[in-house]
Image: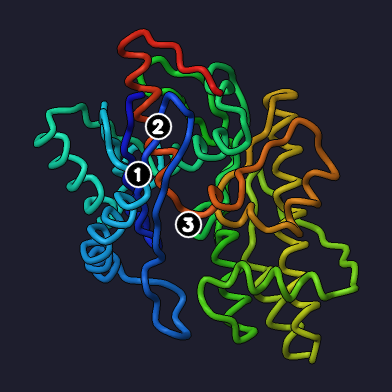
């Protein structure tokens, strides 16, 4: 049963995973990068430092979960998205480790984008890996992206990704964290904001701002600030924030289906683990698939799976989901 290692060193999480192809099973270990109280994120230099410190510890944790056997390949995310010019220094940490490991073990090295890793993790955890063989729509919604994507089969790189829509200003994850910090929550604020929102009994009728299949979210932060200044309860502000994001994703989904046809829609990224948003989407559309919570936030599972699929195609092996 060949095994495949995946490494992902994103802006906020150090991740490593092992995919055991014979069992179709993922073992993973990951850890958030430390962010100082009250701050919204990290400088790239700080992210690189923390990845350098945490990656050996993550690998050690992973090695305690499973005894490595026949390692057929190692993969790493080398860039944020699958577009020309996409770059972040933090991804050099994982790519450098993977490159060194591949040279020592004399095994193939595969690199892809952090975004492809998210999409593959969502397909795997929702039991839909076979979708890599046909067109589908995918959303990657996180602190750095609010992207609607057309994904099509690609013989050499598994997925050919074309952007359908994106956020023209604030990203959904940024909005969640800014509103969360506004309410006194700790970064990252997603889980705590959801915890507040479910306590609200209010229904908000919101009107998303959509322009040519893309969205604008900066007005959401301004409205939440206005609500806070007017004495609105924290639970209601949190609910308004998530309702606005949910309705925005729904409008972008409808626009994507209108453009591309009735394709399956896959939702990935940390924001899509929010149950308030998820339930709104499920109530509006059929043929939708979501990453399981443990595969929604940044992880290396999809990166490991990417290497396995590349290996199988290069050797004419049929990867069957079990």
Tell me the SS state at disc 2.
Answer: strand
| Location of residue 151 in the rendering, given as x and y in whole percent from the top left corner | 54, 27
163 or 41, which is in the foreground? 41
Looking at the image, is mark 1 or mark 2 earlier in the sequence? 2
Residue pushed farthest top?
316
Q: Quadrant of residue 316?
A: top left
Alpha carbons under labels 2 and 3: distance apart: 30 Å
Here the colouring is rainbow
| Vertical relation: 133 (above or below) 150 | above
Distance Cα–Cα, label 3 vs label 1? 32 Å
Q: Are marks 1 and 2 in contact (CB under 8 Å)?
A: yes
Q: Which quadrant of the structure image shows residue 317?
A: top left
First in sequence: mark 3 vs mark 1: 1
Q: Are marks 2 and 3 in contact (CB under 8 Å)?
A: no
In the image, residue 77 sits, relative to residue 30, either above or below, namely above
Q: Position of residue 292 (x, y in %)?
A: 61, 46
Residue at 54% in and 22% down:
321
User: The N terminus is located in which quarter?
Assistant: top left
Q: Which mark is residue 144?
A: 3
Residue holding disc 2: 20
Residue depth check, mark 3 versus mark 1: number of the one nearer the observer: 1
Q: Which mark is residue 66?
A: 1
Crowd around label 2: few <14 · some 14–19 · many ≥20 (10 Å): many
Query: Which image quadrant is residue 157 in?
Result: top left
Query: Which residue is painted at 50% across and 35% down in the image?
Result: 120
Element type where label 3 sits in the image: loop
Relative vertical location of residue 225 with respect to residue 301 in this rendering, above or below: below
Q: Residue at x 34, y 49 (%)?
A: 16
Please name which of the two marks, 2 or 3, marks the residue nearer to the observer: 2
């Amino acid at each position: 049963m060949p095994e495949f290692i995946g490494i992902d060193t994103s802006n906020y999480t150090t991740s490593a995973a092992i995919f055991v192809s014979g069992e179709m099973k993922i073992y993973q270990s990951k850890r958030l990068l430390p962010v100082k109280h009250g701050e919204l994120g990290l400088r790239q230099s700080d992210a690189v430092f923390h990845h350098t410190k945490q990656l050996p510890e993550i690998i050690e944790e992973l090695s305690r979960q499973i005894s490595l056997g026949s390692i057929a390949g190692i993969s790493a995310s080398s860039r944020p998205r699958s577009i020309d010019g996409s770059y972040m220094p933090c991804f050099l940490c994982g790519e450098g480790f993977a490159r060194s490991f591949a040279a020592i073990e004399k095994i193939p090295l595969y690199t892809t984008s952090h975004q492809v890793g998210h999409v593959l993790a969502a397909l795997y955890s929702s039991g839909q890996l076979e979708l890599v063989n046909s067109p589908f729509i995918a959303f990657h919604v996180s602190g750095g992206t609010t992207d609607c994507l057309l994904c099509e089969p690609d013989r050499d790189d598994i997925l050919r990704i074309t952007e359908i829509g994106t956020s023209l200003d604030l990203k959904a994850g940024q909005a969640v964290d800014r509103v969360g910090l506004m309410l006194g929550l700790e970064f990252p604020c997603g889980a705590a904001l959801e915890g507040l929102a479910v306590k609200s009994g209010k229904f908000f009728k919101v009107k998303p701002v959509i322009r040519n299949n893309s969205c604008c979210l900066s007005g959401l932060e301004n409205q939440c600030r206005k609500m806070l200044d007017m004495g609105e309860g924290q639970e209601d502000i949190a609910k308004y924030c998530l309702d606005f994001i949910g309705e925005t994703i729904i409008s972008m989904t409808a626009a994507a289906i209108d453009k591309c046809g009735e394709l399956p829609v896959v939702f990935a990224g940390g924001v899509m683990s929010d149950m308030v948003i998820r339930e709104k989407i499920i109530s509006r559309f059929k043929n939708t698939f979501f990453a399981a919570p443990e595969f929604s936030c940044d992880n290396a599972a999809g990166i490991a799976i990417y290497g396995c699929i590349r290996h199988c195609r290069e050797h004419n092996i049929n990867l069957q989901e079990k």
